[in-house]
Amino acid sequence: MSRGKHFQRKRHTKLFAVLVLLALLTAYPFYEAYHLRQEDITLEIADLPADLNGLRIVFISDIHAGPFFSARRVWNLVHRINALNADIILLGGDYAEDTDGAVRFFQEAPAFSARLLTAGVVGHHDRMERNATLNQLQSAMVAANVVPLVNNMINLPLGEAKLTIAGIDDYTLGSPDVSGVARRTKAEEFVIFLTHNPGALPEANAALNQDGLPRWYNLALCGYTHGGQVNFFGRPLIEEFRMTESRYLSGWIEENRVPILISNGVGTSYFPVRFAARPMIHLITLKRK
């Protein structure tokens, strides 16, 4: 082989390798968006009531049923969650792209199945009303055996333990009443606080319970951020998620000695891709420390 042909072949090989790399980089964000990860975590909590020891909670958020999350994917998601045999299923909002879609989600999706309770808050997409209203959405949730927590709470006595799950309206498009919800809780209750948007956390941390005491909740579960959805060097590409304080972008944090989860969520917004923000569902087991 002549020297010229050798260099030409080498050049073609490098070009092919570059094209393959570019194709993989282009395809990977679509791959990541479709590959749901399950986080199994045992959450050790000091002074956890004995009757809550071993309680299994599934948390999911930001499904965004619609063009990027088909009815078949919804079916697979719900059946995967039900197979976890959770005691409680908690939903973090943004079930679809607008209120109409959220209503259809609860009308058409398979039923969630938890031993004790399924409950959820609403997100900002769920509050993008067109024809359906918030009241219609809440009615659809109730018909699907899901307790809507819109500035509301539900109390579950479990043996000697008093479990309270409290949720607020969406923090950006709704009418959230963080302090009002906090004032309805009591010191002897174990409170799980649900908010779609973690932007509510500073206000929640400053609120007081019925006894005038801080630290009114024992665990907070949030969605909204998608973990940034598309991140480059730790910075979200989508402006909406760049507006979230960095400590509230993704994962587990602790404030006031209280564990807080900001979930990456399940679906996508704007376009059906993710990068460095894999979709997640969470199976949380409470354990007395």
Image (cartoon, rainbow, N blue to C red):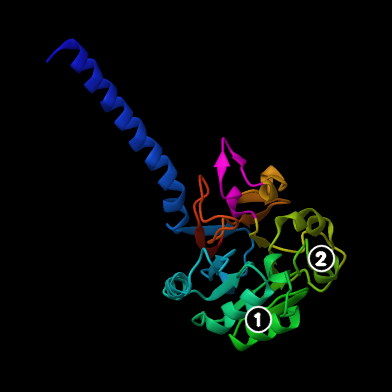
Is 105 above or below relative to 287?
below
Query: How far is the residue under mark 1 from the one under mark 2?
Result: 18 Å
The image quadrant that residue 207 belongs to is: bottom right
Q: Residues within 10 Å of mark 1 (few under 14, many from 20)?
A: many
Are the residues flagged by discs 1 and 2 in contact, CB closer than 8 Å? Answer: no
- In the image, taking residue 103 as reference, residue 204 lies left or right, namely right
Quarter of the image where the C terminus is located = bottom right
Q: Where is residue 139 in the image (x, y as percent from the top left)?
A: 68, 86
As helix, strand or loop, the secondary structure at mark 1 comes to strand
Q: In this view, does 52 lie above or below 1?
A: below
Residue visible at 82% across and 57% down? Answer: 203
Considering every residue shown, the one lying at the far right of the view is 212
User: Is 123 colored magenta in this rendering?
Assistant: no
Amino acid beneath label 1 = Val
**Residue 8 in picture, x, y percent from top left:** 24, 19
Q: Is residue 95 rendered to the left or right of residue 41?
A: right
Question: What range of the chain is rendered magenta?
Answer: 225-238
Res. 73 visible in picture: yes
Q: What residue type is labelled 2?
A: Val
Residue drawn at x 73%, y 76% as measured from the top left: 153
Which percent across, then down, holds residue 136? 71, 84
Q: Does the magenta stretch include residue 231?
A: yes
Q: Earlier in the sequence, mark 1 or mark 2?
A: 1
| Element assignment for label 2 | helix
Farthest left residue in view = 1
Q: Name the residue under label 2.
A: 178
Q: Residue at x 51, y 62 (%)?
A: 281
Q: Is residue 79 above or below residue 229?
A: below
Q: Where is residue 243 in the image (x, y as percent from the top left)?
A: 72, 46
Disc marking residue 147: 1
Q: Nearer the viewer, residue 215 or 105?
A: 105
